[in-house]
Image (tube, rainbow, N blue to C red):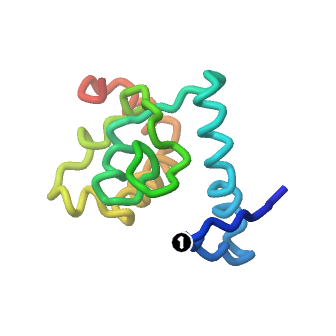
């Protein structure tokens, strides 16, 4: 159910094209996520990896945007599932680059069973 409300002085962003329906669905869900969190039915978490998105200016939340559906919500701090900085050491700009992150995720997906087993035993990841 999509509806629009006119608010004087505020112009919404155009909706995403059909090929980005997955992204538009996520954007449309943000107010519901905010409501469920305020009702205590959902807890939002923030890991160092997601906090890095905030540094790049691409993250919603913590009252940064006018009309932000997540303003005033406190995020629970949690560790990253895999501490990427233990495996990738480079300049912060390169580390924060979306392409670097995607390449790292692809590397994880491409690990065979023995590589994943060796990685799980590596003490530096704790």
Q: Residues within 10 Å of mark 1 (few under 14, many from 20)?
A: few
User: Residue at the location (41% across, 35% down)?
Assistant: 46
Q: Position of residue 23 (x, y in %)?
A: 64, 62
Looking at the image, the residue that sits furthest to the front is 8
User: Residue at the location (68% across, 49% down)?
Assistant: 29
Q: Quadrant of the N terminus?
A: bottom right
Answer left or right for 88 relative to 117. Answer: left
Residue nearer the viewer, 120 or 51: 51
Determine which quarter of the picture holds residue 12.
bottom right
Q: Position of residue 126 (x, y in %)?
A: 30, 23
Q: Is residue 27 above or below residue 117?
A: below
Q: Position of residue 24 (x, y in %)?
A: 67, 63
Answer left or right for 82 relative to 124. Answer: right
Determine which quarter of the picture holds residue 118.
top left
Which residue is tagged 1?
9
User: Residue at the location (44% across, 36% down)?
Assistant: 72
**Callout 1 secondary element:** loop
User: Residue at the location (67% across, 73% down)?
Assistant: 15
Determine which quarter of the picture holds residue 7.
bottom right
């Amino acid at each position: 159910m999509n509806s629009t409300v006119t608010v004087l002085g505020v112009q919404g962003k155009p909706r995403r094209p059909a090929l980005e329906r997955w992204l538009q669905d996520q954007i449309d869900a943000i107010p519901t996520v905010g409501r469920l969190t305020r009702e205590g039915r959902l807890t939002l978490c923030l890991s160092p990896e997601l906090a890095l998105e905030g540094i790049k200016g691409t993250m919603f939340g913590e009252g940064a945007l006018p009309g932000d559906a997540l303003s005033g919500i406190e995020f629970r701090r949690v560790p990253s599932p895999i501490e990427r900085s233990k495996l990738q050491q480079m300049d912060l700009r390169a580390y924060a680059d979306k392409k670097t992150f995607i390449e790292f995720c692809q590397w994880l997906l491409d690990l065979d069973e023995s590589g994943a087993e060796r990685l799980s035993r590596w003490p530096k990841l704790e």
